[in-house]
Image (cartoon, rainbow, N blue to C red):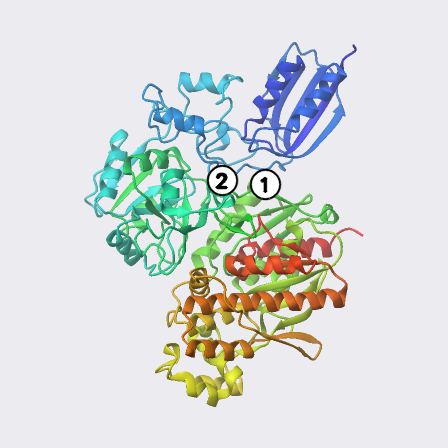
């Protein structure tokens, strides 16, 4: 049979995942000639052989290594250069379009080596292969080769070099390959400035274990930054960490040794187990067991705790030696970005950590842990970071030829998005833009992504809020670079993000956007919106009835203020006065000034916020502190209360009415019913559950009415409130029972962490070629 010669170009996530040795093995099996190499836009295969064997090669490419993701395979005719066999060639330059693989948790084969006393990598904290190990956190350039990673300074010993060069070895071209002879080493430091005694090598881990077991706080260098670790069962150790870090109540993540230990402390469904064992190794929110618990101050008031499994060899060895759960909290001072460099850690964590367990492999970029929760039966990303970034998202086909866009996202849970060639690249979680350090981190990360992925935007998309720092930064970039500025309304971006992830391209959808607050076209603060959206525009069809926010942003931090204004709206000032003495949240409060502000409209903007509604209910049932210590605290406490309810009870009914041309959800009947039940002795968990149920029912009812009015059969859910498992667990089945198709994002956070994807989709659509 005559031979054919083809060039096969494979694009997608095909570098750093063992794709070239995978191709080499296929070519050997099929007895083909030619070569395979990395290049900037993917993997290039030039191959000669009988046509049926070339077809077989292409067919088998569709089942690549586990972490690889193929986006396209293009075949072209080529010239035979007289190859005698099939080889793996050095990387080639080219246009940078190849995806970089996210960091991968240590694989079972490497774990087995670490546990084997006869293996040369026994207990070695930097063991890895083509199926696991650091990737994005060490990459400094594309194509992905060792000299373009932070492993460049570590020269392979002969044994590692032989593995690296052998196509049949699982470490073939594993760029971080290393061993105790030639690879990174641990270092332990303890004591205050000027009295530190460094310990290097094998004893470093032993010292860290002793410090942790003694109840100390140890800063541990991982893949994307440092963690602050302490015993998760010691209230004293956790209290010390909280006091030093100034983190009084926000839940802390906990690392467990393995799945049996996870099962001892938490109960979880199949989706949660899948998420825990995923190669991304995120923090997964799971329900705690009451019979076996962590220290009460690990997640105060919460039913759920964030668990994660060891994802590096260092964590694996450490957890086996400790034998009990460890708190793993991002190493930073309150509000500041996570610490990533050794010298920085020793300086910035002074007074917080008692000791430091570090290593000499540099971290190329800061990556906080990803956070995942199972909602509506599927794992969904709440925070995107290590293990997930920078995997790209395919945009709907209608945006494939749009100009490249930079979308700046919002000010909370900041993340930017770059688009090019029909793909969206959502950055890792950066923090809150209220901190100058976060703004600087965003600019540094943006420069890093642009250099790494070779992207130059033509358009900058920003939120419409005139006071957002992300908007100001985007405007400045647009002016200095000559890029076009595109403004996108906050809740339009939320719904567009859900549409884009779903690949939606079939016209308008109904949108339910529930969050804290976002600037609306009418100048009020939106937050519980019923919309009709396509990528070009949004139209508001309904909302939660507006109430004043007395004190403006202060009301977002003091839930009792929102309770006062909601009850005044529902009962009138006199009615609220009659019950004020019975409500702990309102006792001894100076309410007259706030009422005057609301009455005259001074520093009391109107809001339709669902988030502020949750705050008010949390204050009513005494699950909210007088002043929040972290964003979303009151709503999370309310959800935790609802999860404790013993069985279902009657939902608290909201009203539904027309207000002009808007369908309006009226919470006044709900408040009156809630006060009545409270007086009758209904428990706080039951009341919290009834509130969630009532809101889910009225949202489903309102959406059903709008679906009939508009003829639309698909509803997209978005906004930070859609991270609430109790609400989503009730709402989705109700919408589906009404015959509606429900879109809910899985890979893009539904909250502000995914806002940039929606902004980018809107801008890309508006500027697509005619």
Where disc 1 sits, the SS reads helix
- Ranked by sequence position, the earlier of labels 2 and 1 is 2
- Circle 1 residue: 453
Q: Can residue 467 be seen in this view?
A: no
What is the x, y in percent for residue 38? 60, 27
User: Which residue is located at x 42 percent, y 88 percent?
Assistant: 578
What is the x, y in percent for residue 415? 53, 53
Q: Looking at this view, is 39 or 64 the one in front?
A: 64
Q: Specify whether 582 is left or right of 426.
A: left
Q: Residues within 10 Å of mark 1 (few under 14, many from 20)?
A: many
Relative vertical location of residue 427 with respect to residue 495 in this rendering, above or below: above
Select label 2 or label 1 by which is in front: 2
- Circle 2 residue: 280
What is the x, y in percent for residue 345? 33, 46
Q: Looking at this view, is 66 or 520 the one in front?
A: 66
Where disc 2 sits, the SS reads loop
Structural distance between the alpha carbons of marks 2 and 1: 21 Å
Q: Looking at this view, is 745 or 233 the one in front?
A: 233
The answer to which quarter of the image holds residue 759 is bottom right
What is the x, y in percent for residue 639? 46, 62
The answer to which quarter of the image holds residue 72 is top right
Relative vertical location of residue 484 with respect to residue 555 in this rendering, above or below: above
Q: Specify whether 16 is left or right of 283.
A: right
Quarter of the image where the N terminus is located: top right
Q: Specify whether 543 is left or right of 123.
A: right
Relative vertical location of residue 472 with respect to residue 58 in this rendering, above or below: below
User: Which residue is located at x 51 percent, y 71 percent?
Assistant: 613
Disc tally is 2
Q: How crowded is mark 2: few (under 14 residues within 10 Å), some or many (20 or more)?
A: many
């Amino acid at each position: 049979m005559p031979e054919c010669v083809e060039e096969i170009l494979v694009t997608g996530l095909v570098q750093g995942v063992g794709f070239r040795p995978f191709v080499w093995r296929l070519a050997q099996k099929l007895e083909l000639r030619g070569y395979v190499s990395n290049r900037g836009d993917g993997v290039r295969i030039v191959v000669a052989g009988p046509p049926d064997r070339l077809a077989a090669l292409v067919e088998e490419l569709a089942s690549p290594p586990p972490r690889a993701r193929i986006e396209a395979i293009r075949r072209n005719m080529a010239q035979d250069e007289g190859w005698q066999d099939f080889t793996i060639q050095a990387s080639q330059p080219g246009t940078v379009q190849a995806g970089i693989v996210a960091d991968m948790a240590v694989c079972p084969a490497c774990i087995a080596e670490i546990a084997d006393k006869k293996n040369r990598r026994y207990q070695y904290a930097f063991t890895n292969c083509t199926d696991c190990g650091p990737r994005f956190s060490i990459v400094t350039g594309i194509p992905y080769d060792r000299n373009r990673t932070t492993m460049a300074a570590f020269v392979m010993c002969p044994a590692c070099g032989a593995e690296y060069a052998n196509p049949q070895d699982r470490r073939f071209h594993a760029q971080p390959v290393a061993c105790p002879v030639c690879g990174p080493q641990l270092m332990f430091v303890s004591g205050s400035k000027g009295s530190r005694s460094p310990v290097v090598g094998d004893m470093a881990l032993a010292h860290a274990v002793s410090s942790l077991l003694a109840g100390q706080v140890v800063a541990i260098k991982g893949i994307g930054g440092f963690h602050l670790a302490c015993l998760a069962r010691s209230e004293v150790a956790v209290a010390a960490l909280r006091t030093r870090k100034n983190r009084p109540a926000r839940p802390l993540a906990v690392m467990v040794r393995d799945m049996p230990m996870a099962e001892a402390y938490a109960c979880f469904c199949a989706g949660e187990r899948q998420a825990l064992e995923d190669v991304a190794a995120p923090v997964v929110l799971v329900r705690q067991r009451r019979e076996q618990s962590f220290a009460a101050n690990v997640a105060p008031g919460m039913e759920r705790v964030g668990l994660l499994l060891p994802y590096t060899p260092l964590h694996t060895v450490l957890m086996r030696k400790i034998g009990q759960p460890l708190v793993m909290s991002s190493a930073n001072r309150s509000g500041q970005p996570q610490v990533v460099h050794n010298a920085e850690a020793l300086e910035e964590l002074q007074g917080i950590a008692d000791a430091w367990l570090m290593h000499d492999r540099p971290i190329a970029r800061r990556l906080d842990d990803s956070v995942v929760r199972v909602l509506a039966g599927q794992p969904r990303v709440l925070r995107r970071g290590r293990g997930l970034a920078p995997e790209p998202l395919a945009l709907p086909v209608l945006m494939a030829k749009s100009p490249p866009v930079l979308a700046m996202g919002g000010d909370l849970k900041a993340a930017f998005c770059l688009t090019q060639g029909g793909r969206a690249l959502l950055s890792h979680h950066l923090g809150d833009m209220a901190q100058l350090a976060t703004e600087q981190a965003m600019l540094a990360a943006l420069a890093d992504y642009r250099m790494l992925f070779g992207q130059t935007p033509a358009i900058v998309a920003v939120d419409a809020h005139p006071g957002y720092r992300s908007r100001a930064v985007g405007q400045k970039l647009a002016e200095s670079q000559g890029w076009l500025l595109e403004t996108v309304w906050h809740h339009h971006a939320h719904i567009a993000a859900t549409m884009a992830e779903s690949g939606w391209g079939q016209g308008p959808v109904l949108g339910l956007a529930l969050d804290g607050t976002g600037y609306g076209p009418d100048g009020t603060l939106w937050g519980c919106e019923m919309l009709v959206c396509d990528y070009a525009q949004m139209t508001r069809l309904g909302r939660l009835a507006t109430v004043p926010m007395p004190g403006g942003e202060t009301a977002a931090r003091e839930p009792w203020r929102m309770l006062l204004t909601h009850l005044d709206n529902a009962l009138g000032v006199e009615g609220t006065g009659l019950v004020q003495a019975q409500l702990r949240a309102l006792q001894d409060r100076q309410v007259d000034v706030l009422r005057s502000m609301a009455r005259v409209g001074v520093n009391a903007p109107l809001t339709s916020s669902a988030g502020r509604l949750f705050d008010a209910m949390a204050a009513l049932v005494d699950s909210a502190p007088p002043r929040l210590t972290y964003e979303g605290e009151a709503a999370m406490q309310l959800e935790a209360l609802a999860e404790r309810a013993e069985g279902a009870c009657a939902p608290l009914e909201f009203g539904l009415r027309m207000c002009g041309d808007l369908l309006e959800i009226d919470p006044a009947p709900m408040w009156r019913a809630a006060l009545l039940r409270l007086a009758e002795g209904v428990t706080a968990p039951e009341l919290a559950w009834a509130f969630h149920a009532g809101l889910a029912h009225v949202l489903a009812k309102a959406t059903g009415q709008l679906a009939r009015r508009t003829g639309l059969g698909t509803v997209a859910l978005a906004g930070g409130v859609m991270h609430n498992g109790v609400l989503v667990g009730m709402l989705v089945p109700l919408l589906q029972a009404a015959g509606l198709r429900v879109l809910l994002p899985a890979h893009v956070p539904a909250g502000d962490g995914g806002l940039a994807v929606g902004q980018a989709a809107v801008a890309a659509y508006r500027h697509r070629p005619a």
